[in-house]
Amino acid sequence: MRKISIFLLFMVFCVTSFAQNPIRIAIRGIIQDTSFVGMGGATVMLLAPKDSALVNFSRANDKGVFEFKNVKNIHYILKVSYVGYLPYQQILAPSATEITDLGNVGIKPISKELLEVVVKTARAPLTIKGDTIEYDARSFKVPAGSSVEDLLRRLPGMEIDAQGNIKAQGKDVKKVLVDGKTFFGDDPKAATKNLGAETISKVQVFNDKSEQAKLTGVDDGKKEKAINLELKEEYKKGAFGKITGAVGTDSRMALRGNYNKFNKTSQFSILGYGNNINETGVNWSDYGEFKGNNSFNNNDNGDFGFGGNRWWGSDNEGVTNNFDGRGFTNNGGGGVNYNFDNKKTKFSSSYFYNQTRLFLDQYQNKKTFLQNSAFLTTDTSSQNNFRGNHSIGTRFERMIDSSNTLIVKANMRAGMKNDANSMFQSNLTEEGLLRTRSAIKNSNDFTNFYLNTNAIFRHKFKKKGRSYALSFGYNVNNSNGNENLNSLTKFITAGTFTEQVRAIRQINDNDNRQNMVKGSALFLEPLSKKIFWETFYNFSSDNRSVNRQAFNGLVENRRMDSLSTYFENNVTYNRIGTSLRYSFSGVNISLGGAALRYDLDGKQFPQKGGQLFSSVTKSYPNFMPYLDASLELKNNLYFNFSYSLDITAPQIADLQPVINNNNPFFIS
C-alpha cells in the first residue's frame, strides 16, 4: 500500500510539473514607439541564447502586434528591429503558461549621427522589406569550403531536398540570380552548387513577377519565388574560383570547379564537374528544360493573355538524363556564362555540355493476382545507357527609349542518346510451372535538335498604364535515329513448334520533325487607377511529321507494313480574348473569356512519298472562360483561386497510334 501511495504521489508530481511547464507556447506583444504608436512592419526575431542563431521570425501587423505560435518553451533572445530605431533586445525565460504576453515593447528612434554606427554593430540576421526577406549571410555560420546550397540549408523558411531543389516559404524556387543577373540560364542549382558560401553577403527571397506584368507595369498576380544572391564587395571586382574533390570507397570520386570574374556591369563564369556518384551536376537534365522552357523565365515566352503557354507540345523523341536515381552513373560537364548590363541594355548568355552514362543491373521477382488465379514473373535485366547534351541560351533586352523596349531570346539544344538493354524474363504458374521464357536485347541511337526563338516589342503610351506588346516566335524540334529489337520467346504450353517459338529481329528507323511559327499581340488600357482592360490575340501554325519505318531482319530486312507509317499533321491555332483586371494593394482579380479555334489537317501515308492512305480534317472551336483571384496576405501568406477551360489539339500519337512491340509480353 505504501509503494502504491508513493507511485501515485510521483505521478501527480509529474503531471503537475508538466502542467506548469507546457512544451509548446505562444509569445506575443505589441511594438510601439515612444509616442505609443504601433510600429507596423517591425521585424521580430527569436534567437538562441547560445550562439544567437535565428530560430523564428515574424513581422508586426499594422497595429504593431506580433505573435509566435507553437514554439518550444525554452530560453530565447527576443530581438526587434525597425529602420531608424534602436534595436531592442530582451531575454525570455521558459514560461509557466501556454501564452507569454510581453505587453507593450517600446523602441526608441535613433539620431542620424548614430545610425551608421548602430547599423554596423547591431546587424539583424534578417530584415523584411515588402515581400522580400533578406538574410544576412554573416549571421549564419557554415564550415569553411561550404557551397551556397549549404548556406541555404541554415536559413529559416528554406528547404533543400536531396537533389538540391529549393523551397522558400513552402514554394518552389524557380530561379537564382547573382547580383540581380541570370547565372547559367536561371538554373537554380548552377549557382547554389557551384558558388561558395564565403562569397555571399545577403540572400534575398522575393516574388518575381511575370514577364507580361514587367512589360505592362500592371501586376497580374502571377508570381514565382526567386532568390537573389548579393555578393560581398570584394567579390564584385576581380576574379575568384574554387576547386573541390572527394574520393571514397569502391573507387567513388567527385571533382568540381569554377572560375568567376565579376564587376558592376558584367559577369563571366566557367564551371565544370565530373563524378561517378549519381550527381548530374546542374539541372540541365530536366525534361522541361530540354523542351526549352527553363533556360530563362517561363513567363518570357511572348504568349500573351491568360493560359498563354498551353499550346506547345511534341511527338518527338526526347534526349534526357533523367534516370530516376537508379543504378550507377558516370557524369561530366562544363560550361560558360556571360552577362552584361548597363542602363539601357541587358544581355545574358550561357553554354553548357553535360553527359551521363548509366550502368544498371536489376533483378525482379513479382507475383500478379488476377480474379481467379495468379502468376509469377522473374526478370533479370542489364542497362548501359548514354546521354549527352549541348545547350545554348541567350537573351537580349534593349530599352530603346522611355516608351519602347525590345526583347530577343534564343535557346538551342542538341542532344544524343544511346541505349543498350538486355532482359531475361520467365512467367510461371502459381504452382511454379514454367509457362513462357523470353530473351530480349534492344538498342537504340537517337539525336535531337531543338531551337526556340522569340522577339517581343513593347510600347508605352503617354497615358499611364496604356501599352501594347507584340511578339513573334519560331520553334524547331527534330529527332531521328534507329531502334534494333531482338527477342526470342518460347511458349512452353503451346502445341506446335511454330506456336512455341516466336522470334523478333526488327529495325525501326525514326525521323520526326516539328516547325512552329507563332505570334501574339496585347493591348492594355487603364480604366482607372485600379481597373485595367486587356485584350489579346494568339496565333500559331504547327507543322509536324512522324516517319517510322520498320524492317524485319529475319526476312532480308523486308519492310513491315503493319508497323510502318508516315504521318503529317498541321495544326493552326487562333485565339482572341479580353479581360478586366482589378489590381490594388496585393489584391488581383481578373475576369474574362476567349474564343479559340484549332484547325487540324492530318494525312497518313504508308511511307514518305507514297500514296495517301487516310486523312483527317477537323476544326475545334471553343469558348474559354477565365477567373483568377489572388490575395497577398501578411507574413508572406497568399491566397489564389483560378478557373479556366481549355482544349488541346490531338497529337499524332492520338490520331495514328503505332504498335510498340519492344517487349513481346507487353504490346502497346
Image (cartoon, rainbow, N blue to C red):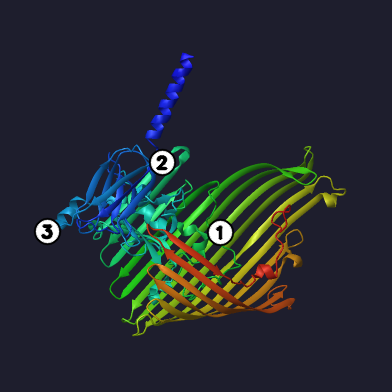
Q: Give the class, few, some or many, for how many residues have Cα within 10 Å of label 1's Cα (few <14, many ≥20).
A: many
- Is residue 126 among the parts visible in the rendering? no
Element class at badge 2: strand
The residue labelled by disc 2 is: 247
In the picture shown, does residue 64 fall above or below 454?
Answer: above
- Which residue in the rendered view is the most extreme toward the bottom? 462
Residue 347, position as x, y percentages in the image = 35, 71
The residue labelled by disc 1 is: 417
Residue at image x 65%, y 42%? Answer: 364
Q: Which amino acid does label 3 sit on?
A: Glu
Residue at image x 72%, y 45%? Answer: 368
- Is residue 660 among the parts visible in the rendering? yes
- Per the model, the C-alpha gap separating discs 1 and 2 is 28 Å
Q: Give me the disc on residue 113.
A: 3
- Of the numbered discs 3 and 1, the one sitting upstream in the chain is 3
Residue 405, position as x, y percentages in the image = 36, 79
Q: Give the class, few, some or many, for how many residues have Cα within 10 Å of label 2's Cα (few <14, many ≥20).
A: few
Element class at badge 1: strand
Q: Which amino acid does label 2 sit on?
A: Val
- Per the model, the C-alpha gap separating discs 3 and 1 is 65 Å
Residue 30, position as x, y percentages in the image = 29, 52
Q: Give me the disc on residue 193.
A: none
Element class at badge 3: helix
From the viewer's perspective, is the residue at label 3 or at label 1 nearer? 3
Q: Foreground: 172 or 548?
A: 172
258 relative to 477 in the view: left or right = left
